Amino acid sequence: MFRRALVLVFATCGWLLVIPAASPPSNAADGRTLSATPADGLGNEVVAVSWTGFQPSVDGAYTVTIMQCKGAVPSSLADCYQTFRPPATNDDNGSAVPDGVTQADGTGTSFIEVRPALQLPSLDCTATSPCSLVAFENDGSEYPAVGLPTTAATTTLHFARSPADCPPVDTFDVTTAGEASASQALYSWSAQTCTGADALHVDYTESSSVDGRENFLNGLIDVGIASGPADAAAAAASGRSPEYAPIDLTGVVVAFNVYDAVTGERITDMNLTPRLVAILIAGDQFGGPAETLFSDPEFLAINPGHNWPSSTVPPLLRAERNDDATLLTRWLNTDGAARQFLDGNDSVAEVDPYWKGIDYPTDTFEARDQSTLGSYNPRSGTITNARRLFNMQAPGDGQVATPSFQGLLGVLDAVTARKFGIPTAKLRPASTSTSMATDTTGFVAADGIGLTSGLAAMQSDDATGTKAADVSAAAAYPLTKIDYAMVPTTGMSVEKAAKIAQFVEYASNQGQQPDVLAEGYLPLTTDLQSEAGQVADAVKAGGSDTPPPLGGGDTPPDTADPELPFDPGALGPTDSSDSPSFDDGSTPSDPATGGSSNPTKTSDKGGSGNETAAPLPISKFKGGDGQAILPIVLLIGLAALVFGPGLTWWSGRRRRV
């Protein structure tokens, strides 16, 4: 009878024990080798790929395809993400490289964007689940149904710990949403704090400062992430008595992907004035300054030594309302020469009539000229714009910049630009002068020196304690910014207050360590850490044993739609195909295909996502992605083991009666 119960257990659970046979590790054929730099501690970033021993590429033949694959060594190309990056396809989600070139000596280099489980769950690349790159020659052969191409070489990728490595939870301790420039820090912090004796489970939805403030004031999240304070009247009306804890220091940058028109080499240095950036954003789109930025006399004077392309394409800008736009347009508005151009009084360049006299600063980069909507097309999401900039993919749908005679520029944050290996321009602080710059002095980079000087020059708001960049300060990077955790000091339970304070304390202390903080951030100074500590104390003091009303920050995140607990309209005027989220590998599930997009969340495997937002863990436990099957099957099996003998005896006895 006990044997019958065991048979029932294995009949019920046996499928769990069937492990597909793995192909033996694939060695590079004919002495081929492949390597990636960096190959450890990876996130969503661009890596350099190098290979040796390949057939030299000749007249477009024997180029090299590179794909990211699941597992340390892929068993076949079915394990790989096969959607090609633009311009090979028009799919914004593509990352595979189809056209690497091998030199006459058999060596070659290329770059590929690699994605962890947060951005590409179908490959499930985590700290405990390495992934790989495969490279093979395009020799005209079809992809093999089994195994890798005979010319393939592989190399292993090791990813940093991310929220995808966190255990699933039904309810997060702290829910956050807001500024995209804080995303790399939030992903890292939530991954570091989700285990241990005093685990802290943090959910983060990447959007914008505007969205973070609005959802915080509406009581939909515990903490809003923003680069500036909320309107004082709106903050008072919320009943949450918000305070602001500094959590990261970085900068807004003008990034560029430009190649020398003669040598074909990538250009990595550029100086820009506010006037030139105003021309980039608001120049006449039909044969005017936006087409001839690189021939502008000011640009040529401050950028000697290169053969610049003949034109640019419209810039890559964020479509949703965001504080980065406010900071950049405040810099433009403060500068005399930039304002003179915007008012239509520049001696050389013409402003687009739809921008003439525009009222800056503004938190929205609008496509104001209806005749250029097909090409001047702000896209939602920082990562969307970074990917397009890396791929030389213009903002207009189906449009690609041609490196031999066009350059592409965009507005990003310093951290994202570093992750994607995109150069950023040195900027000149705003000036009251209306004269053009004539030399290369006075330009400041968004590096440690520039950001430190920018921080020292920041001006404090007495009412909120927040700091804003002084866009005119000499020798300081003019677009320096601090991201703040907007936290409640009333209307929450003691337990919730303790968790929010724990989040602030970790972010402003341990979270500032070099092994935790990504490049592009500058660690918080002791003064800023002290400010954050005081805010954390105020949060703890505001906790109450009287439960807050429903609808406040203590509401679990599984209300209504677990994928989107915020107003979709808050993401700004854009079509859904340009959401700041990307393929989660679930629609369809084959890694070789692309996917759809939803807002970015730290909700994959109990963590966060930057591709299509996976349902929150409580949703998964209810059945999403089949994760409810395992506990149900195990319970059935356990019941059979415990009650099987008795049931068998009882059944036999009934037959004998």
Image (tube, helix red, strand yellow):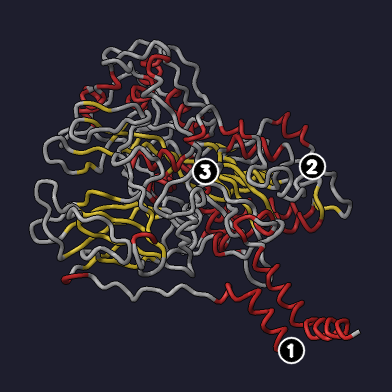
Q: Residue at coordinates 36% horizontally, 16% vertically from top-left?
A: 341
What percent of the width, then of the height, locates residue 158? Answer: 40, 66
What percent of the width, then of the height, locates residue 344? Answer: 37, 10
In the rendered structure, which disc, 3 or 2, sits on the residue that comes first in sequence?
3
Residue at mark 1 = 2
In the rendered structure, which disc, 2 or 1, sits on the residue that comes first in sequence?
1
Q: Is residue 336 above or below residue 3?
A: above
Q: Quadrant of residue 385?
A: top left
Q: Residue at coordinates 37% horizontally, 36% vertically from top-left?
A: 254
Q: So how many labels did they put on this image?
A: 3
* 637 horizontally vs 69: left or right: right
Q: Residue at coordinates 68% horizontally, 38% vertically from top-left?
A: 215
Three-letter amino acid code at the position of disc 2: Gly
Q: CA distance from mark 3 to mark 2?
A: 25 Å
Q: CA distance from mark 1 to mark 3?
A: 58 Å
> Does dot 3 land on a helix, a strand or a loop?
helix
Residue at mark 3 = 180
Q: Nearer the viewer, residue 280 or 431?
A: 280
Q: Residue at coordinates 44% horizontally, 43% vertically from top-left?
A: 383
Work out whether residue 37 can be spotted: no
Q: Check disc 3: other Cα within 10 Å, few if <14, some if 14-19, many if 20+.
A: many
In the rendered structure, which disc, 1 or 3, sits on the residue that comes first in sequence?
1
- Looking at the image, is mark 3 or mark 2 nearer the viewer? 2
What percent of the width, then of the height, locates residue 93? Answer: 41, 44
Residue at mark 2 = 551
Q: Is residue 476 above or below residue 334?
A: below
Q: Nearer the viewer, residue 208 or 357?
A: 208
What percent of the width, then of the height, locates residue 547? Answer: 86, 51
